[in-house]
């Protein structure tokens, strides 16, 4: 059972132009992204393992996160993506997807959660887990070279 994730595209809503837009939705602009990943940056999610990616937004409303995913035999276990202001704190917002909502082949998957206000330059965390997945795993993909300089993997 595998699900692969390349972190992080954080999409925010704002009236300012950020220079480029990955998703053509009115008023949504990419604030943060890290699209590099390799086989050496894989970590298991499931069986009690959760991972977080810290980030510092430059805009003040967070609308969604996109993750690069694929799956292999994930059963019916959900994957959950949350935003937190502390790594082990309460969720500020959260959304889950069933394995049926994740493609078999690798592609970007949008987690469009209820919008939240964030404070630019404060640290927040994208937290990913699969609490009901036992005996298998989702895999979170990243880079062994740490190319993202506005946060780190936890």
Image (spheres, rainbow, N blue to C red):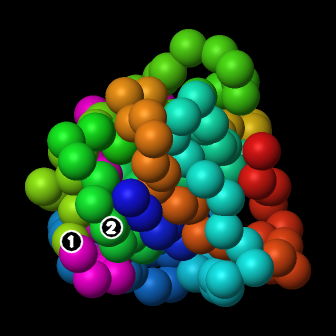
Eyeballing the image, is 14 above or below 70? Answer: above
Q: Which of marks 2 and 1 is nearer the N terminus?
A: 2
Helix, strand or loop under label 2 = strand
- In the image, 53 versus 92, the foreground residue is 53
* Quadrant of the image containing the N terminus: bottom left
Find residue 82 and name its label.
none
Residue 56 shows in this picture: no
Which residue is rendered at x = 44% and y = 28% of the image? 131
Label 1 neighbour load within 10 Å: few <14, some 14-19, many 20+ = some
* Quadrant of the image containing the C terminus: top right
Label 2 neighbour load within 10 Å: few <14, some 14-19, many 20+ = many
- In the image, 126 versus 123, the foreground residue is 126
Which residue is rendered at x = 29% and y = 53% of the image? 74
Examine the image and state in which quarter residue 133 appears: top left
Residue under label 1, please give it: 103
Task: Indicate whether residue 133 is drawn in magenta.
Answer: no
Helix, strand or loop under label 1 = loop
Residue under label 2, please give it: 71
Q: Nearer the viewer, mark 2 or mark 1?
A: 2
Which residue is rendered at x = 37% and y = 28% of the image? 132
In the image, taking residue 131 as reference, residue 38 lies left or right, namely: right
Q: Position of residue 149 (x, y in %)?
A: 84, 68
Residue 37 shows in this picture: yes
Chain part drawn in magenta? 104-117
In the image, taking residue 28 as reference, residue 124 lies left or right, namely: right
């Amino acid at each position: 059972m595998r699900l692969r994730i390349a972190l992080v595209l954080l999409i925010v809503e704002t009236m300012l132009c950020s220079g480029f837009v990955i998703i053509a939705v009115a008023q949504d602009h990419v604030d943060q992204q890290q699209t590099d990943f390799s086989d050496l940056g894989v970590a298991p999610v499931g069986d009690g393992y959760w991972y977080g990616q810290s980030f510092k937004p430059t805009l003040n409303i967070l609308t969604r996160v996109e993750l690069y995913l694929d799956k292999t035999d994930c059963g019916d276990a959900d994957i959950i993506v949350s935003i937190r202001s502390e790594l082990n704190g309460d969720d500020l917002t959260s959304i889950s997807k069933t394995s049926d909502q994740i493609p078999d082949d690798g592609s970007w998957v949008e987690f469009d959660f209820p919008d939240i206000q964030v404070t630019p330059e404060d640290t927040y965390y994208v937290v990913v887990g699969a609490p009901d997945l036992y005996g298998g795993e989702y895999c979170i993909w990243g880079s062994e070279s740490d190319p993202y300089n506005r946060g780190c993997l936890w």
